[in-house]
Amino acid sequence: MTLVESVIDGVVDIRAHKGRSFLQMVGVILGVASVVTVLALVDSGRRRSVEFFSEIGGLRKLLIINQPGRDTAKSALELSNVGLTYEDAEALRSIPFVTQVDPIANARVLVSRGDYRREWHIDGVTPDYQTVYKFFPGRGRFITQDDLAHASRVCVLGDTAARQLFGSEDPLGKTLFLDDVGMTVVGLMQRKEYFFNKGNDNALEWMNRKVMIPITSLHKRFTGDQDRKVNYINAMIDKSENNLKAKQEIETMLRRRHQGIQDFTVQDRMARLAKQQEQGRQLDIVFMAAGVVSLLVGGIVIMNILLASFQERVREVGVRKALGANGLHIMAQFLVESVLVTLMGGVIGIFLGVLFAQTVSRMIDQPTVITPQMAMIGFVTSVSAGIFFGFYPAVKAARLNPVEALRYE
């Protein structure tokens, strides 16, 4: 019996016993559907996280923030440290893996224009800010190195800030007073938007509210900070594979500059993303386990039904062996039937998994994507289950003594 004949015989037997074949498929269908659904949701969550991070600089960005010691009794050395400074940021540019460095200092000032007066949170930034955050001017220009060198009285506004401060008037070239210091508006930023799922809250609205000035202007004209302290520093790495090496280099350099005191922390987005995925992995394991259990149950059902089928076809197997079929032919006959059943169940399970994923997607307002790799995993899983659970009945049939088979009642 050739492989083609075995396939034809398997198809005929499946059609002849539709109810039995359906029972064999149920477990496989549900198992594959569960696996595909979980893979789709996990991949969707990962894609959304990466997509969000990409909107504000990607996974190559390291964030360095001040972290004062928790001990109430600090040493004189700790008290002498002022935390992160503009000079620290400039020193980080010498690290080989670092491509851009953006120190940021914050201040609250009184913003006024005409009759409008309101306290506002402003940021002192550098030209690298636009590249680090992927936040570029829609009109006008951004802060330049010349602005830094001369502590220029210029500012750049986010979209929401421009509308709140100037209404329908064009802000470019106009003067905005920050603590009575006149600052010329030289740029208007492109609007940034990102909506998780189908919510109405813009996760990047905080960027649209920005009022940004040269960091040197903030130190010279507003805070009067001789140490030129910064709230945090962004460092862009050449490629995400070097994040860990760059983090170690940054920590070593800053510890040396801070006289051995670690009054800062370096946050890696790659590590943060991995931690988020790890936190959600427990739930993923539960759903995946449910799919695997369904596959196991389906496999056991397949094996038992094949054993029952074998008992019904003992004389048929004996006749085929008497006519010259060897054990390998008989084994192939039963294995092919098992694989066909699980393969059909796998295909149905893949389509059902897509339906499940879309249903869950609508329930949680999170888009999902079914990739060819997921379909392939479902396909391979179902075929593997067919081979594994069909192996024992196939071997038992192949080892059957033809004389005993012909005498079987």
Image (cartoon, grey):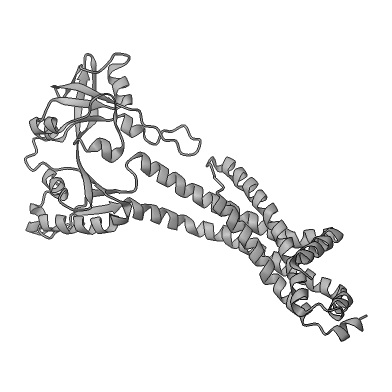
- 96, 175: nearer the viewer: 96
Instruction: Work out which quarter of the rendered image holds the N terminus and state it.
Output: bottom right
Hey, which quadrant is residue 121 in on the image? top left
Residue 4 seen: yes
Q: Looking at the picture, does residue 94 appear above or below residue 200?
A: below
Residue 371: horizontal and vertical position, in percent?
55, 49
- 149, 286: nearer the viewer: 149
Name the residue located 83 percent from the left edge and 63 percent from the top edge.
Answer: 13
Name the residue located 21 percent from the left edge and 20 percent from the top edge.
Answer: 112
Name the residue located 12 percent from the left edge and 31 percent from the top edge.
Answer: 146
Decide if residue 188 is on the left or right side of residue 381: left
Decide if residue 88 is on the left or right side of residue 385: left
Residue 71 seen: no
Decide if residue 101 is on the left or right side of residue 78: right
Instruction: Work out which quarter of the rendered image holds the C terminus and state it.
Output: bottom right
Name the residue located 70 percent from the left edge and 52 percent from the top edge.
Answer: 348
